[in-house]
Image (cartoon, rainbow, N blue to C red):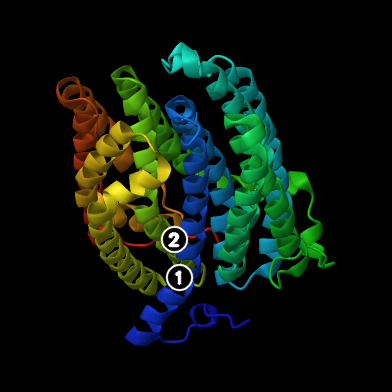
Amino acid sequence: MKDHLLPIRTGQKLTVREEIMLILRLSLPAILAQISSIIMQYIDASMVGHLGANASASIGLVSSTTWLVGGIITAASMGFSVCVAHSIGAQDEDRARVIVRWGLLCNFLFSLIVMALCIGLSAYLPVLMGGEEAIRKDAAAYFLVYAISIPVRELFLTSQGMIQSSGNIRIPSILNVIMCVLDVVFNALLIPHFGVTGAALGTAFSFVVITIAMMYILLVKSPALHIVSRKDKENVSFFTFLSKELPTALRIAIPVAIDNIIMGFAYVAFTRIVSPFGTVSVAANSFSITAESLCYMPGFGIGVAATTIVGQCIGARRKELAKRLGWMAVVLGMLIMGFSGALMWIFAPRMIGILSPDAEIRRLGATILRIEAFAEPLYGASIVAAGVFRGAGETLMSSVLNLMSVWLVRIPLAYYLGSIYGLKGAWIAMCSELCVRGTLFLIRLVLWKPQRTTVK
């Protein structure tokens, strides 16, 4: 397989056309992977939606908490993945393999702690979120299954991120598509027998299968990252790794974790604002978030590609190239998400109609999706720009911008407008905040001067 990032590592000059093609080649598989992930959620929501509004609301009640936890374990994986990208960019594959070996162990141990905490929380979460009595049991069961699967999800995210950081985005993308297919199969088998719990089990089983495959690709098949080599540097002790490599990974991961926690608690707070509006509003909110994600996942795919490209540019000490390619990726993300936002406005009733047969949920969901469509271009700017800064290892300021945007704009405005206009008011607040956030990230990108590198 051709290494499209080799010219970056070897100092070759790229034409504008070659730079654009590089971004497209790495973005398209990542976009496909992100869209397949959302299709998997779409299928879950659709299958559960046909069980009734209560079943849908039970998942919607805890979904913000699963995003919060998912953000924390994603941050843990990202710290080591960016370090791998910088090492590969500096053509130091020995150091990259050291990070792979011990980074996987650190993240697995961390995930066990998170799993234990979430299992303990599962029985109390629906009450804390203000859920109605009729949906609490299913909500608790769904979150319990999610909690048990956290270590597998962490290994999946870490191995996927490391493979992508080496420049191989195609294989993880293919595996994500396969996971989507497996999820459909497992759900079809389990939901008729176990309802909401069956949806959680189906997703968990698909993660198990694909994580095994992803780990095999990383540890055995990856030319740059496999750990079957007997090079001396790969035999460094765990304690040496803790003193030399872990601090660098933590400097990247901790701000991302803070960022994700901020966003996760914002989603929890937003759900808490919405939950008193009733079961229909909770279900419409949950379905609309799932439907909207089909439009913004291309942005996350481009963000993944931007992290890999910029990470290797920084490792190769090509900072001007890093900024130029970062801008190209952001513009591409804004264009694609602007187009997807227009499609969402047009097809909003159909998108919600696939997820729920309930007429009231479909009407309300279509209305709030059309509100959100106007935010998509600037939302795309914030998503891809965040990927650029992650690739550079500069994650602290992104966390600060998210903190300001979400907690000073979205939550107060959602509380105020929600009290007047209900769910529609809350989504007007969300749309406004995403536009503010995108503007802040664009300003930061204009002022950005790449400096930091993790390569020693």
Q: For the residues marked 1 and 2, what is the alpha-carbon distance in whole angstroms?
A: 7 Å
Residue at 43% x, 27% y is 57
Residue 34 image position (x, y, % from top left): 48, 57
Quadrant (top left/top right/bottom left/bottom right) for the N terminus: bottom right
Kindly state the secondary structure of the residue where label 2 is placed.
helix
Mark drawn on residue 65: none
Judge whether 164 appears above or below 44 on screen.
below
Q: Is residue 269 visible?
A: no
Q: Quadrant of residue 164?
A: bottom right
Q: Earlier in the sequence, mark 1 or mark 2?
A: 1
Q: Amino acid at mark 2?
A: Gly
Instruction: Identify the residue under disc 2.
Output: 301
Q: Give the crowd class for mark 2: few <14, some 14-19, many >=20 residues within 10 Å.
A: many
Residue at 45% x, 24% y is 54
Residue at 69% x, 56% y is 100
Judge whether 429 appears above or below 256 on screen.
above
Q: Nearer the viewer, residue 412 or 320?
A: 412
Residue at 57% x, 31% y is 196
Q: Nearer the viewer, residue 394 or 42?
A: 42
Residue 35 image position (x, y, % from top left): 46, 58
Q: Amino acid at mark 1?
A: Leu
Residue 432 image position (x, y, % from top left): 19, 41
Instruction: Identify the residue under disc 1.
Output: 28
State yes or no: discs 1 and 2 in contact (Cβ < 8 Å).
yes
Q: Quadrant of residue 171?
A: bottom right
Kindly state the secondary structure of the residue where label 1 is placed.
helix
Judge whether 11 appears above or below 401 on screen.
below
Q: Give the crowd class for mark 1: few <14, some 14-19, many >=20 residues within 10 Å.
A: some
Residue 211 image position (x, y, % from top left): 69, 52
